[in-house]
Amino acid sequence: MKKLLSIMMMVSALCVWTSSIYAQTRIALISQVKSASANTDIAIQKYLQSKGYQVEVLDQSVSPNSLKNTDLVIISSTVASKNLQSGWRQLPLPLMTWENDYLDDLAMTGKRINNDFGEVEKERYLWLVNAPHPLSAHLPAGTRNVYKAQAPMSWGKPGLGATIIATIYGQPEKVAIWGYEKGATMDYESLAPAKRLMFFLNNDTFTNLSDDGLKLFDASIEWLTNK
């Protein structure tokens, strides 16, 4: 009887362990795998894996229709936006990006470069404007040092349905972090087919994130994967 009970406990533990594996959130990180900045995407992959996520790095040539069993898509700015396959805009999966040159294709902003989207060359501060929201990572409103050293930051001007979290310091018209809930109005009359989020990174700046920057990054992933 004791032997049978022991076997049953082992089987139960195995089932729990197996379930925890399959319960992992699965992330597809879209990268230009042969680019000079691809190592930064690998660093992001390893960081997210250390947080318990299952992360696969896929080349920019991948078709969005080929994604199976994926919970979140991240489009890195290492991609060449002109080489991305069509269909990402309509993808009914949560999507995060910091490729500012692709924001208009995703209908997350208008189409005018340096007006509706762009990049600042050197900055390390954001102005956090929506502290009560989960995307603010419980940080207080106001100036937040998000980079260890000055570096490029991506920005955009979102549509009316956006939840704005932070702007470039001293430039409130340039939004650095914002999200769209599923069904929210993005650019003009485009509706978000699932959650969408813009983060302020550049090709090589993930490893330059400060503690507050990482908290905001973590909060973004959690918000996107919280169903």
Image: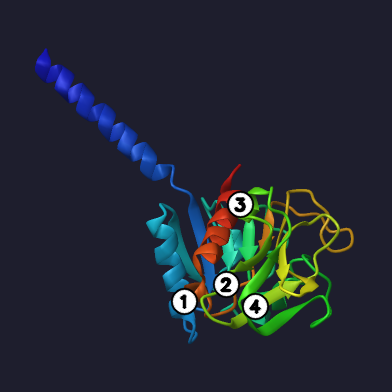
Spatial separation of the CA atoms under disc 1 and disc 3: 21 Å
Q: Is disc 3 placed on a helix, strand or loop?
A: helix
**Mark 1 or mark 2, which has the lower sequence index?**
1
Q: Amino acid at mark 3?
A: Leu
Measured as percent of width and height from the top left, residue 91 is found at 68, 57
User: Dot 3 corresponds to which residue?
Assistant: 224
**Mark 2 or mark 3, which has the lower sequence index?**
2
50 left or right of 116 in image: left
Q: Amino acid at mark 1?
A: Thr
User: Dot 2 corresponds to which residue?
Assistant: 76
Measured as percent of width and height from the top left, residue 124 is found at 61, 77
Kindly identify the residue that appears in the image at 74 percent across and 66 percent down: 106
Spatial separation of the CA atoms under disc 2 and disc 3: 16 Å
User: Dot 1 corresponds to which residue?
Assistant: 40
**Mark 1 or mark 4, which has the lower sequence index?**
1
Kindly identify the residue that appears in the image at 64 percent across and 77 percent down: 153
Disc 1 vs disc 4: Cβ atoms closer than 8 Å? no
Spatial separation of the CA atoms under disc 1 and disc 4: 15 Å
Disc 1 vs disc 2: Cβ atoms closer than 8 Å? yes
Disc 2 vs disc 4: Cβ atoms closer than 8 Å? no
Q: In the rendered image of this protein, does residue 201 appear above or below residue 24? A: below
Q: In the rendered image of this protein, does residue 62 appear above or below residue 48? A: below
Residue 153 - label? 4
Q: Is disc 2 placed on a helix, strand or loop?
A: loop
